[in-house]
Amino acid sequence: MSYLSANLNMLINAVKKASASLNRDFSEIEQLQSSVRGYKEFVASAIKKVENNLRVELSKSRPAYAFAENNKPQPTGSHFIVSALDGVVNFAHGIPYFAVSVATYENGQITAGVIYNPATEECYFAERGSGAYKEGFRNHERLRVSARKELGECMVAAKTLPTRENERENAICRKIQAHLVPQANACRCFGAMSLDLANVAAGKIDAVVSAGNPTSEIAAGILLVKEAGGAVLDIEQKDIRSEDLDTVLRSGDIIACNANLGKKISDLLNK
């Protein structure tokens, strides 16, 4: 189809090809659950294979592009932002909610993104200015964020339990638990941020609120939400009248939702 550019087609094919080993490994993971000694090494090996495969496949078409790495300075030129396995714990426990996520960052902005769940073969993709889509057998499904306006009607994907030694992130988690959870219809922690964002773009989840996420797990999803008509904010953003996606990428503190809910959620968390 006309909106599936050569660049986006390259990304989709590279992600699927690189993920083939992950799908095979997931089929074997249940047999390893009873082996305390074996499964952690198996999961680490599975991730390494996908990382290597992604570098090989993506570099074929864009050999000059660097690869951004978590906890390291972002490359200055055009580069890929890659998560070889978002949802590691789900994968390790045989839960089919995990994804491979790839985004391209060019000229100071995210220009394309692909999120693929090998276990379910669900593929979400977007290119800046061209909309967000879910892959279909004959026709690709155009994605739109939900239209719900009241939090009492909403499903929110939120990280609410402080789990890290970062006090700032823990403080945000406590705010979410104290102020957002009581207002929402339901809050869930699904365990794979990239897929959560894809589901916001698809209108299945109304909002994502989470602190301290690695850039690799949110970059492609941010673009999907924006291209599906949604809003993306930093949790502690003071002026929410305009977007500041670079701040969200740097902090990992994200609110992603439809435009109706952005101010309401931000106000709750910044009282």
Image (cartoon, rainbow, N blue to C red):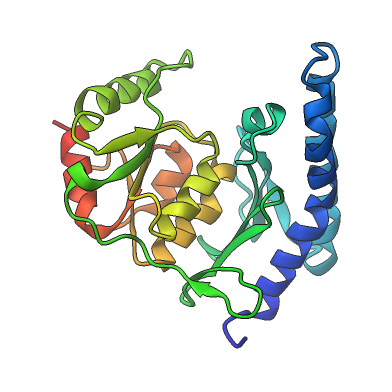
Taking the view exactly as shown, the residue that stands out farthest to the left is 271
**Can residue 239 be seen in the rendering of this structure?**
no
Residue 267: which quarter of the image?
A: top left
Judged left or right of residue 152, residue 7 is right
**For the point 28% across and 24% down, which residue is it?**
177
The picture places residue 174, in percent across and down from the top left corner, at 29, 20
Image quadrant holding the N terminus, namely bottom right
Name above or below for residue 163 compared with residue 3: above
Taking the view exactly as shown, the residue that stands out farthest to the bottom is 2
Residue 260: which quarter of the image?
A: bottom left
Judged left or right of residue 33, residue 205 is left
The picture places residue 182, in percent across and down from the top left corner, at 20, 29
The picture places residue 209, in percent across and down from the top left corner, at 35, 39
The picture places residue 27, in percent across and down from the top left corner, at 81, 39
**For the point 18% across and 49% down, which residue is it?**
263
In front here: 15 or 203? 203
**For the point 23% across and 56% down, which residue is it?**
148
Judged left or right of residue 55, residue 70 is left
Image quadrant holding the C terminus, namely top left
